[in-house]
Amino acid sequence: MSATTAPQADAAPPLDPALLAAVESALTAFLNAQTLPENLRAACLHAVLAGGKRLRPMLVLESAMAAGGRVEDAMPAAVAIEFVHAFSLVHDDLPALDNDSMRRGKPTCHVAFGEAMAILAGDCLLSLAPLSAARCPFNGSAIGHELMDATTRMIAGQVYDTLQGFPEGLSEQAKLELVHHNKTGALLECSCRMGALAAGADAETLARLTSFGRAIGLMFQVVDDLIDATQTAEHAGKATGKDAEAGKLTYPVVHGIEGSRREVERLRLQAVDALAPLGSRGERLTKLVEFLARRTK
């Protein structure tokens, strides 16, 4: 992560604007099509359309294309994963957990709509996610299973991170990986697997995209740990230093800054190697992993 690579990290992610627009449209259309109380719909739309990178749904779509599939066949899975991600953020922001009042420059759901509605909006998004996943024309049942399994892992990771409860005898390194592979990594890995399944991928392609997703899932959180430890709040666009203040296990705490950067590089190479046999179909995912490895915000 030299000074020469930092400007690339601060550029926009290499994501197709047309695909991003299609994701936004699909998220809105699905919520507007549901029979819901209008105040609940408004809270769900607020939670889902508050901005963000759309990394998880884009990984679904890009993985599907890398596996030879079509965007339209994978879009229901992309909607589903973003609903789960939005649900997790709504609940994380609540006073009982992170107690955040702003997200992406806007009031959090419980600030805008009250705690009761925020809880119910999160519940609603979680319940709608498998309904969207089931609309995938290929492997709908398997995709729904992947989604709910990853959601359970994500929740377990949040418990490990905030409330502990680790199995006995784990080293600090093992605890750290247990948190990161689940809290952050589960949905990123799942996104890649769901995209492959939506494309009807063969076993080898599914395995390669799984390996890719597992590598970037851990890498994404290691980079986040580095940003929290090394960047100013002004540059990162969010509060930094919070992990150290909270006494949380992070890669810089366990491995140091340089050790964490070496781990990012190891995981980057692992992800790129997993994509190599896919040839040109994996080029867009390769560009994305290069960005994710070097981002500074």
Image (cartoon, rainbow, N blue to C red):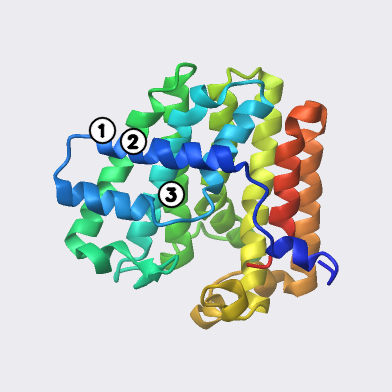
Q: Point out the residue furthest to the left here.
A: 37
Secondary structure beneath dot 3 equals helix
What numbered label is drawn on residue 85? 3
Residue 270 location, x and y as percent? 78, 44
Kindly report the distance in space between the C-alpha atoms of the residues bearing marks 3 and 2: 18 Å
Residue 31 location, x and y as percent? 29, 39
Residue 246 left/right relative to 62: left
Residue 287 left/right relative to 161: right
Residue 183 location, x and y as percent? 50, 54
* Above or below 190: residue 207: above
Q: Residue at x 43, y 49 (%)?
A: 85
Q: Can residue 170 be seen in this view?
A: no
Q: Residue tagged by mark 1?
A: 33
* Above or below 6: residue 215: above
Q: Residue tagged by mark 2?
A: 29
Callout 1–callout 2 Cβ contact below 8 Å:
yes
- The residue lying toward the viewer, choosing from 122 and 158, is 122
Mark 2 neighbour class, 10 Å CA radius: few under 14, some 14 to 19, many 20 or more? few
* Above or below 42: residue 129: above
Q: Which residue is drawn at 63% across and 45% down?
A: 15
Q: Which amino acid does label 2 sit on?
A: Ala
Q: Which amino acid does label 3 sit on?
A: His
Secondary structure beneath dot 1 equals helix
Mark 3 neighbour class, 10 Å CA radius: few under 14, some 14 to 19, many 20 or more? many
Q: Quadrant of residue 79?
A: top left
Callout 3–callout 2 Cβ contact below 8 Å:
no
**Quadrant in which the C terminus is drawn:** bottom right
